[in-house]
Amino acid sequence: MPGTVVTEVVVTCQFLPPDLRQSPRYTSVPEGGSVNITCSSNSSLLYGVYLAREWPMASKGYVIYYSSVKTPTVDKAFETRVGFSGSQQNLTVTLSSLQPADTGLYTCQDAGDSQVSGHGTLVLVSEKLSRGENQAAPFGLSVALAVGCFLAGLGLGVVCALRTQIKQLCSGKSRSAATVVYEDMSCSQRPTLSRPNPYQ
């Protein structure tokens, strides 16, 4: 139509790639303890969240898969020891009844793109000492103290003995010197025969 102006509007939509943040970076727990790992994102484009075990390589695999539209799945090694709370954008995974073999690096990952992941959480599970080992520690300390005291007493005894011998040697030298002087003096007082004077 004459006088009609047609305007074309082009709308460009740019979607930012999803990001994943993770906490904590490191945690140390005793055997039988638990740890909470939080995976969070400000994006709604996640396909779901994996908590993967990246290290050691022999135990590499997924611990849990969580999605807001699917039923979560848990690895058999953790199926009775894992819990979770929150949403897909802010998920907290709890690993409980941890054993030394569970030590490793756990990473949050986007289920649709494994390149989108958190920095990882290093979990160190310390082995619990047995009762016998706990009792052995004080006993070993007592033995060490007893040996130390014995050696210290022995050292003092040796020092005292040496000191006494040194004193005896010094006093022996003084006596022998005095005796020599006395004997010299007694010899000078011995009677001697007088010779007649030929000039008388």
Image: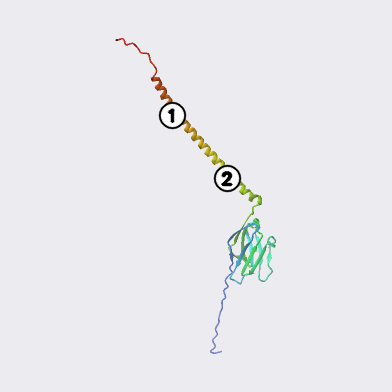
**Quadrant for the N terminus in the image:** bottom right
Residue under label 2: 145
**The furthest residue to the left:** 199
Q: How crowded is mark 1: few (under 14 residues within 10 Å), some or many (20 or more)?
A: few
Residue under label 1: 174
- Is 142 left, or right, of 76 in this rendering? left
Q: Distance between the residues labelled 2 and 1?
A: 44 Å
**Amino acid type at image mark 1:** Ser
Which sits earlier in the primary sequence, circle 2 or circle 1? 2
**The furthest residue to the bottom:** 2
Which callout, 2 or 1, points to the residue nearer the camera? 1
**Amino acid type at image mark 2:** Leu
Q: Which of 10 and 169 is in front in this view?
A: 169
Q: Where is residue 9 in the image (x, y as percent from the top left)?
A: 55, 81
Q: Position of residue 22 (x, y in %)?
A: 59, 65
> Regarding mark 1 in the picture, which secondary structure is present there?
helix
